[in-house]
Image (tube, helix red, strand yellow):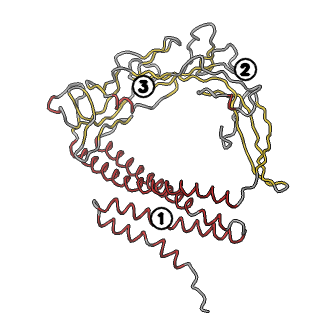
Protein backbone atom coordinates (compact mmCIF):
# COMPACT_ATOMS: atom_id res chain seq x y z
CA UNK A 1 0.00 0.00 0.00
CA UNK A 2 1.20 3.49 -0.80
CA UNK A 3 2.45 5.65 2.02
CA UNK A 4 0.53 8.59 0.57
CA UNK A 5 -2.78 6.91 1.34
CA UNK A 6 -3.77 7.07 4.96
CA UNK A 7 -5.74 4.20 6.50
CA UNK A 8 -9.47 4.72 6.73
CA UNK A 9 -11.50 3.93 9.80
CA UNK A 10 -11.52 0.25 10.73
CA UNK A 11 -12.18 -2.01 13.65
CA UNK A 12 -8.52 -2.75 14.48
CA UNK A 13 -5.26 -0.96 13.93
CA UNK A 14 -1.65 -1.35 15.10
CA UNK A 15 1.78 -0.24 13.95
CA UNK A 16 5.49 -0.76 14.38
CA UNK A 17 8.65 1.08 13.28
CA UNK A 18 11.71 -0.33 11.52
CA UNK A 19 15.00 1.52 10.98
CA UNK A 20 17.45 0.43 8.28
CA UNK A 21 20.95 1.77 7.58
CA UNK A 22 22.41 2.42 4.14
CA UNK A 23 25.99 2.91 3.10
CA UNK A 24 26.57 6.29 1.47
CA UNK A 25 27.13 5.69 -2.22
CA UNK A 26 30.56 6.62 -3.57
CA UNK A 27 31.17 8.92 -6.52
CA UNK A 28 31.56 6.11 -9.04
CA UNK A 29 28.43 4.37 -7.76
CA UNK A 30 26.40 7.59 -8.05
CA UNK A 31 27.77 8.09 -11.53
CA UNK A 32 26.71 4.56 -12.47
CA UNK A 33 23.20 5.20 -11.14
CA UNK A 34 23.01 8.43 -13.12
CA UNK A 35 24.05 6.56 -16.28
CA UNK A 36 21.09 4.22 -15.79
CA UNK A 37 18.82 7.24 -15.43
CA UNK A 38 20.23 8.64 -18.68
CA UNK A 39 19.10 5.53 -20.57
CA UNK A 40 15.60 5.93 -19.15
CA UNK A 41 15.69 9.62 -20.02
CA UNK A 42 16.63 8.90 -23.63
CA UNK A 43 13.70 6.46 -23.84
CA UNK A 44 11.24 9.02 -22.42
CA UNK A 45 12.66 11.68 -24.74
CA UNK A 46 12.06 9.50 -27.81
CA UNK A 47 8.60 8.50 -26.58
CA UNK A 48 7.60 12.15 -26.18
CA UNK A 49 8.15 12.81 -29.89
CA UNK A 50 5.93 9.88 -30.78
CA UNK A 51 3.15 10.99 -28.41
CA UNK A 52 3.21 14.63 -29.57
CA UNK A 53 3.44 13.93 -33.30
CA UNK A 54 0.86 11.14 -33.50
CA UNK A 55 -1.53 13.07 -31.24
CA UNK A 56 -1.78 15.90 -33.76
CA UNK A 57 -2.52 13.48 -36.57
CA UNK A 58 -5.12 11.71 -34.44
CA UNK A 59 -6.78 15.00 -33.45
CA UNK A 60 -7.06 16.25 -37.03
CA UNK A 61 -8.28 12.87 -38.25
CA UNK A 62 -10.96 12.70 -35.54
CA UNK A 63 -12.10 16.28 -36.14
CA UNK A 64 -12.40 15.65 -39.89
CA UNK A 65 -14.34 12.42 -39.27
CA UNK A 66 -16.77 14.19 -36.94
CA UNK A 67 -17.32 16.98 -39.47
CA UNK A 68 -17.96 14.35 -42.13
CA UNK A 69 -20.34 12.47 -39.86
CA UNK A 70 -22.36 15.59 -39.03
CA UNK A 71 -22.77 16.36 -42.73
CA UNK A 72 -24.03 12.81 -43.49
CA UNK A 73 -26.06 11.80 -40.42
CA UNK A 74 -29.75 11.00 -40.94
CA UNK A 75 -32.02 11.71 -37.94
CA UNK A 76 -34.62 8.97 -37.36
CA UNK A 77 -37.97 10.42 -36.30
CA UNK A 78 -39.64 7.03 -35.91
CA UNK A 79 -37.52 4.56 -33.96
CA UNK A 80 -40.22 1.88 -33.95
CA UNK A 81 -39.91 1.03 -37.63
CA UNK A 82 -36.90 0.15 -39.77
CA UNK A 83 -36.61 2.05 -43.07
CA UNK A 84 -34.63 -0.04 -45.60
CA UNK A 85 -33.62 3.16 -47.44
CA UNK A 86 -31.35 4.07 -44.53
CA UNK A 87 -29.51 0.76 -44.64
CA UNK A 88 -25.76 1.43 -44.56
CA UNK A 89 -26.22 5.11 -43.66
CA UNK A 90 -25.09 6.95 -40.55
CA UNK A 91 -28.19 7.55 -38.44
CA UNK A 92 -29.07 9.33 -35.21
CA UNK A 93 -31.83 8.33 -32.79
CA UNK A 94 -32.86 8.89 -29.19
CA UNK A 95 -35.11 6.74 -27.05
CA UNK A 96 -35.49 4.52 -23.98
CA UNK A 97 -33.52 1.31 -23.60
CA UNK A 98 -35.28 -2.04 -23.80
CA UNK A 99 -34.19 -5.52 -22.73
CA UNK A 100 -36.30 -8.65 -23.32
CA UNK A 101 -35.81 -10.18 -19.87
CA UNK A 102 -34.59 -9.01 -16.46
CA UNK A 103 -31.08 -9.77 -15.26
CA UNK A 104 -31.02 -12.09 -12.25
CA UNK A 105 -28.72 -13.17 -9.48
CA UNK A 106 -30.47 -16.24 -8.07
CA UNK A 107 -28.03 -16.57 -5.15
CA UNK A 108 -29.26 -13.26 -3.72
CA UNK A 109 -32.71 -13.18 -5.33
CA UNK A 110 -31.99 -9.97 -7.25
CA UNK A 111 -33.87 -9.20 -10.48
CA UNK A 112 -33.51 -5.95 -12.43
CA UNK A 113 -34.52 -4.90 -15.95
CA UNK A 114 -31.25 -3.33 -17.07
CA UNK A 115 -28.48 -3.60 -19.63
CA UNK A 116 -25.94 -4.55 -16.96
CA UNK A 117 -26.03 -5.92 -13.41
CA UNK A 118 -22.83 -6.01 -11.35
CA UNK A 119 -22.27 -7.96 -8.16
CA UNK A 120 -19.43 -6.44 -6.12
CA UNK A 121 -17.94 -8.53 -3.34
CA UNK A 122 -15.77 -7.14 -0.55
CA UNK A 123 -13.90 -8.97 2.18
CA UNK A 124 -12.86 -7.64 5.57
CA UNK A 125 -9.05 -7.81 5.57
CA UNK A 126 -5.85 -6.53 7.04
CA UNK A 127 -4.25 -3.70 5.03
CA UNK A 128 -0.66 -2.57 5.42
CA UNK A 129 0.33 1.09 5.01
CA UNK A 130 3.88 2.38 5.24
CA UNK A 131 5.42 5.81 5.61
CA UNK A 132 9.18 6.40 5.38
CA UNK A 133 11.58 9.22 6.16
CA UNK A 134 15.32 9.43 5.45
CA UNK A 135 17.88 11.01 7.76
CA UNK A 136 21.60 10.90 8.59
CA UNK A 137 23.00 9.80 11.92
CA UNK A 138 26.65 9.25 12.89
CA UNK A 139 27.71 9.53 9.26
CA UNK A 140 25.21 6.89 8.13
CA UNK A 141 22.18 7.32 5.94
CA UNK A 142 19.13 5.75 7.61
CA UNK A 143 15.51 5.14 6.70
CA UNK A 144 12.78 4.98 9.33
CA UNK A 145 9.67 3.17 8.11
CA UNK A 146 6.41 3.12 10.06
CA UNK A 147 4.15 0.18 9.22
CA UNK A 148 0.47 0.58 10.09
CA UNK A 149 -2.06 -2.26 9.92
CA UNK A 150 -5.75 -1.55 9.63
CA UNK A 151 -8.79 -3.75 8.99
CA UNK A 152 -10.92 -2.59 6.05
CA UNK A 153 -13.42 -3.78 3.46
CA UNK A 154 -11.57 -4.42 0.18
CA UNK A 155 -12.85 -5.68 -3.18
CA UNK A 156 -9.55 -7.44 -4.00
CA UNK A 157 -7.69 -10.09 -2.05
CA UNK A 158 -4.68 -8.60 -0.25
CA UNK A 159 -1.77 -11.01 0.07
CA UNK A 160 -0.65 -10.79 3.70
CA UNK A 161 2.51 -12.76 2.91
CA UNK A 162 3.96 -9.53 1.52
CA UNK A 163 3.45 -7.73 4.84
CA UNK A 164 6.48 -6.73 6.85
CA UNK A 165 4.85 -8.41 9.87
CA UNK A 166 2.49 -11.18 8.81
CA UNK A 167 2.02 -12.66 12.29
CA UNK A 168 -1.28 -11.39 13.61
CA UNK A 169 -2.27 -9.94 10.22
CA UNK A 170 -3.17 -13.01 8.13
CA UNK A 171 -5.77 -12.67 5.38
CA UNK A 172 -7.67 -15.48 3.60
CA UNK A 173 -6.20 -16.43 0.24
CA UNK A 174 -9.47 -16.17 -1.73
CA UNK A 175 -12.95 -14.70 -1.65
CA UNK A 176 -15.83 -16.94 -0.61
CA UNK A 177 -17.96 -15.28 -3.32
CA UNK A 178 -16.78 -13.85 -6.65
CA UNK A 179 -17.59 -10.47 -8.19
CA UNK A 180 -19.33 -10.69 -11.55
CA UNK A 181 -20.98 -8.44 -14.15
CA UNK A 182 -23.91 -9.77 -16.21
CA UNK A 183 -24.79 -8.12 -19.54
CA UNK A 184 -28.17 -8.44 -21.24
CA UNK A 185 -27.92 -10.49 -24.45
CA UNK A 186 -30.12 -8.05 -26.41
CA UNK A 187 -30.31 -4.32 -25.74
CA UNK A 188 -32.44 -2.23 -28.08
CA UNK A 189 -33.87 1.23 -28.66
CA UNK A 190 -37.21 1.01 -30.41
CA UNK A 191 -36.79 -1.51 -33.22
CA UNK A 192 -33.00 -1.23 -33.33
CA UNK A 193 -30.61 -3.63 -31.58
CA UNK A 194 -27.36 -2.19 -30.19
CA UNK A 195 -23.99 -3.67 -31.08
CA UNK A 196 -21.69 -4.96 -28.33
CA UNK A 197 -19.52 -1.84 -28.62
CA UNK A 198 -22.51 0.41 -28.00
CA UNK A 199 -23.63 -1.68 -25.02
CA UNK A 200 -20.10 -1.40 -23.59
CA UNK A 201 -20.58 2.38 -23.47
CA UNK A 202 -23.48 1.99 -21.02
CA UNK A 203 -21.43 2.41 -17.85
CA UNK A 204 -23.45 4.69 -15.56
CA UNK A 205 -23.54 2.18 -12.71
CA UNK A 206 -25.70 3.06 -9.73
CA UNK A 207 -25.94 1.21 -6.44
CA UNK A 208 -29.02 -0.93 -6.04
CA UNK A 209 -31.03 -0.14 -2.93
CA UNK A 210 -31.78 -3.20 -0.81
CA UNK A 211 -34.30 -1.41 1.39
CA UNK A 212 -37.14 -3.74 2.25
CA UNK A 213 -35.47 -6.83 0.75
CA UNK A 214 -35.07 -9.77 3.17
CA UNK A 215 -31.76 -11.67 3.35
CA UNK A 216 -31.63 -14.65 0.96
CA UNK A 217 -31.03 -17.18 3.77
CA UNK A 218 -30.47 -17.50 7.50
CA UNK A 219 -26.68 -17.18 7.28
CA UNK A 220 -26.86 -13.67 5.76
CA UNK A 221 -27.80 -10.29 7.14
CA UNK A 222 -29.02 -7.20 5.29
CA UNK A 223 -27.65 -3.90 6.56
CA UNK A 224 -27.90 -0.72 4.48
CA UNK A 225 -27.36 -1.70 0.83
CA UNK A 226 -25.21 -4.75 1.60
CA UNK A 227 -25.77 -8.46 2.11
CA UNK A 228 -23.41 -9.60 4.87
CA UNK A 229 -22.20 -13.18 5.18
CA UNK A 230 -22.17 -12.78 8.94
CA UNK A 231 -24.71 -12.37 11.71
CA UNK A 232 -22.86 -9.33 13.13
CA UNK A 233 -22.33 -6.78 10.30
CA UNK A 234 -21.47 -4.03 12.79
CA UNK A 235 -18.67 -6.15 14.29
CA UNK A 236 -17.07 -7.94 11.33
CA UNK A 237 -14.12 -10.30 11.59
CA UNK A 238 -11.27 -10.75 9.12
CA UNK A 239 -12.55 -13.00 6.33
CA UNK A 240 -16.19 -11.83 6.52
CA UNK A 241 -17.78 -10.97 3.17
CA UNK A 242 -20.34 -8.38 2.11
CA UNK A 243 -22.07 -8.08 -1.27
CA UNK A 244 -23.59 -5.08 -3.04
CA UNK A 245 -25.24 -4.72 -6.45
CA UNK A 246 -24.98 -2.06 -9.16
CA UNK A 247 -27.05 -1.59 -12.31
CA UNK A 248 -26.53 0.37 -15.53
CA UNK A 249 -28.98 1.18 -18.32
CA UNK A 250 -32.40 0.55 -16.81
CA UNK A 251 -34.71 -0.79 -19.47
CA UNK A 252 -37.83 0.64 -17.87
CA UNK A 253 -39.84 -2.53 -17.46
CA UNK A 254 -41.69 -1.58 -14.28
CA UNK A 255 -40.79 1.12 -11.76
CA UNK A 256 -38.05 -0.66 -9.75
CA UNK A 257 -35.46 0.68 -9.11
CA UNK A 258 -35.96 3.87 -11.17
CA UNK A 259 -37.02 5.47 -14.47
CA UNK A 260 -36.08 4.21 -17.91
CA UNK A 261 -32.63 5.14 -19.22
CA UNK A 262 -32.86 7.34 -22.33
CA UNK A 263 -29.90 7.25 -24.74
CA UNK A 264 -28.81 9.06 -27.89
CA UNK A 265 -26.95 7.08 -30.54
CA UNK A 266 -25.06 7.85 -33.75
CA UNK A 267 -24.14 4.70 -35.66
CA UNK A 268 -24.58 2.88 -38.98
CA UNK A 269 -27.89 1.19 -39.67
CA UNK A 270 -27.45 -2.40 -40.78
CA UNK A 271 -30.95 -3.83 -41.19
CA UNK A 272 -32.29 -3.53 -37.63
CA UNK A 273 -28.82 -3.34 -36.04
CA UNK A 274 -26.82 -0.27 -35.03
CA UNK A 275 -23.13 -0.87 -35.75
CA UNK A 276 -19.92 1.07 -36.41
CA UNK A 277 -19.56 3.49 -39.32
CA UNK A 278 -16.17 4.09 -40.96
CA UNK A 279 -15.67 7.57 -42.37
CA UNK A 280 -13.59 8.52 -45.41
CA UNK A 281 -11.09 10.05 -43.01
CA UNK A 282 -10.54 6.58 -41.54
CA UNK A 283 -12.12 6.96 -38.10
CA UNK A 284 -14.94 4.80 -36.75
CA UNK A 285 -18.12 6.48 -35.52
CA UNK A 286 -20.15 4.54 -32.97
CA UNK A 287 -21.37 7.03 -30.38
CA UNK A 288 -23.69 6.65 -27.40
CA UNK A 289 -24.64 9.24 -24.77
CA UNK A 290 -26.74 8.50 -21.71
CA UNK A 291 -29.10 11.42 -22.26
CA UNK A 292 -31.44 12.78 -24.92
CA UNK A 293 -29.44 14.84 -27.44
CA UNK A 294 -29.94 16.04 -30.99
CA UNK A 295 -27.47 15.00 -33.70
CA UNK A 296 -25.89 18.46 -33.56
CA UNK A 297 -25.43 18.23 -29.78
CA UNK A 298 -23.89 14.75 -30.05
CA UNK A 299 -21.22 15.91 -32.49
CA UNK A 300 -20.53 19.07 -30.50
CA UNK A 301 -19.86 16.94 -27.42
CA UNK A 302 -17.58 14.66 -29.43
CA UNK A 303 -15.63 17.63 -30.79
CA UNK A 304 -15.20 19.01 -27.26
CA UNK A 305 -14.04 15.60 -26.04
CA UNK A 306 -11.53 15.48 -28.90
CA UNK A 307 -10.16 18.91 -27.96
CA UNK A 308 -9.77 17.94 -24.30
CA UNK A 309 -8.01 14.68 -25.22
CA UNK A 310 -5.69 16.54 -27.60
CA UNK A 311 -4.58 19.03 -24.94
CA UNK A 312 -4.21 16.29 -22.33
CA UNK A 313 -1.85 14.36 -24.63
CA UNK A 314 0.06 17.54 -25.48
CA UNK A 315 0.70 18.16 -21.78
CA UNK A 316 1.63 14.49 -21.30
CA UNK A 317 4.04 14.66 -24.24
CA UNK A 318 5.68 17.83 -22.90
CA UNK A 319 6.02 16.26 -19.45
CA UNK A 320 7.65 13.14 -20.93
CA UNK A 321 10.11 15.33 -22.83
CA UNK A 322 10.89 17.43 -19.73
CA UNK A 323 11.52 14.32 -17.61
CA UNK A 324 13.56 12.73 -20.38
CA UNK A 325 15.82 15.77 -20.73
CA UNK A 326 16.11 16.17 -16.95
CA UNK A 327 17.23 12.55 -16.50
CA UNK A 328 19.62 12.72 -19.45
CA UNK A 329 21.48 15.81 -18.18
CA UNK A 330 21.42 14.76 -14.50
CA UNK A 331 24.99 13.58 -14.86
CA UNK A 332 26.17 17.21 -14.71
CA UNK A 333 24.54 17.53 -11.29
CA UNK A 334 26.27 14.35 -10.11
CA UNK A 335 29.68 15.67 -11.19
CA UNK A 336 29.38 18.67 -8.84
CA UNK A 337 27.17 17.31 -6.05
CA UNK A 338 30.11 17.40 -3.60
CA UNK A 339 30.10 21.22 -3.81
CA UNK A 340 26.90 22.47 -2.07
CA UNK A 341 26.75 25.99 -3.56
CA UNK A 342 27.72 24.93 -7.06
CA UNK A 343 25.33 21.99 -6.82
CA UNK A 344 22.33 24.24 -6.15
CA UNK A 345 23.20 26.63 -8.98
CA UNK A 346 23.74 23.79 -11.42
CA UNK A 347 20.46 22.16 -10.35
CA UNK A 348 18.52 25.36 -11.03
CA UNK A 349 20.25 25.87 -14.35
CA UNK A 350 19.54 22.31 -15.46
CA UNK A 351 15.84 22.70 -14.64
CA UNK A 352 15.60 25.94 -16.63
CA UNK A 353 17.46 24.33 -19.52
CA UNK A 354 15.17 21.27 -19.51
CA UNK A 355 12.07 23.50 -19.35
CA UNK A 356 13.20 25.69 -22.26
CA UNK A 357 14.32 22.85 -24.50
CA UNK A 358 11.23 20.73 -23.75
CA UNK A 359 8.92 23.65 -24.53
CA UNK A 360 10.71 24.50 -27.78
CA UNK A 361 10.95 20.93 -29.04
CA UNK A 362 7.33 20.21 -28.07
CA UNK A 363 6.09 23.19 -30.07
CA UNK A 364 8.28 22.21 -33.02
CA UNK A 365 6.95 18.64 -32.91
CA UNK A 366 3.35 19.88 -32.77
CA UNK A 367 4.11 22.18 -35.70
CA UNK A 368 5.52 19.25 -37.67
CA UNK A 369 2.31 17.32 -37.04
CA UNK A 370 0.25 20.19 -38.40
CA UNK A 371 2.60 21.03 -41.28
CA UNK A 372 0.88 18.94 -43.93
CA UNK A 373 -2.70 19.86 -42.95
CA UNK A 374 -2.35 23.44 -41.61
CA UNK A 375 0.84 25.03 -42.99
CA UNK A 376 -0.04 28.56 -41.79
CA UNK A 377 -0.56 27.53 -38.15
CA UNK A 378 2.52 25.31 -38.32
CA UNK A 379 4.64 28.30 -39.32
CA UNK A 380 3.27 30.32 -36.40
CA UNK A 381 4.03 27.51 -33.93
CA UNK A 382 7.55 27.19 -35.30
CA UNK A 383 8.09 30.92 -34.70
CA UNK A 384 6.79 30.60 -31.12
CA UNK A 385 9.09 27.65 -30.50
CA UNK A 386 12.22 29.82 -30.54
CA UNK A 387 10.81 32.32 -28.02
CA UNK A 388 11.90 30.34 -24.87
CA UNK A 389 15.43 30.02 -26.26
CA UNK A 390 15.62 33.74 -27.03
CA UNK A 391 14.34 34.61 -23.55
CA UNK A 392 16.85 32.24 -21.96
CA UNK A 393 19.73 33.81 -23.90
CA UNK A 394 18.72 37.36 -23.01
CA UNK A 395 18.90 36.46 -19.29
CA UNK A 396 22.52 35.29 -19.56
CA UNK A 397 24.78 38.15 -18.30
CA UNK A 398 27.40 39.33 -20.81
CA UNK A 399 30.98 38.29 -20.17
CA UNK A 400 33.15 40.87 -18.50
CA UNK A 401 35.79 42.44 -20.75
CA UNK A 402 39.21 41.60 -19.43
Residue at the (60%, 20%) spot, across then down = 175
* Marks 3 and 1 in Cβ contact (< 8 Å): no
In front: label 3 or label 1? 1
* Label 3 environment density (alpha carbons within 10 Å; few <14, some 14–19, many ≥20): some
- Which label number is shown at residue 359? 1
Query: Where does residue 195 sit, x and y in percent of width and height?
Result: 31, 28
Q: CA distance from mark 3 to mark 2?
A: 36 Å
Q: Is residue 200 left or right of residue 207?
A: left
Residue at the (43%, 17%) spot, across then down = 103
Q: Secondary structure at mark 1?
A: helix
- Which label number is shown at residue 235? 2
Residue at the (72%, 69%) spot, across then down = 339
Q: Secondary structure at mark 3?
A: loop
Q: CA distance from mark 3 to mark 1?
A: 50 Å
Residue at the (48%, 73%) spot, across then down = 389
For disc 3, the marked residue is 259
Counting residues from the start of the chain, the first of labels 3 and 2 encountered is 2
For residue 396, which quarter of the picture? Answer: bottom right
Amino acid sequence: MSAANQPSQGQRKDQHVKVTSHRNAGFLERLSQTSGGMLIGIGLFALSFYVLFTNEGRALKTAASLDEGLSLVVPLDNIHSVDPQNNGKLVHLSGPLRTPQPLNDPNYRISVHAAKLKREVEMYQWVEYQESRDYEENGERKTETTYTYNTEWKSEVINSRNFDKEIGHINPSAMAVESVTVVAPDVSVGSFVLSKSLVDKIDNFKKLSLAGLPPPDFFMTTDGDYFYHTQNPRRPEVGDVRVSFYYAGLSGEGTYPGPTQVVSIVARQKDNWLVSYRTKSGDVLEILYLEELSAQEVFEKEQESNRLKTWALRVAGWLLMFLGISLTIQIFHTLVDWLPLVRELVSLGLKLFAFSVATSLSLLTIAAGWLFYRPLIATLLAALAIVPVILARTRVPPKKIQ
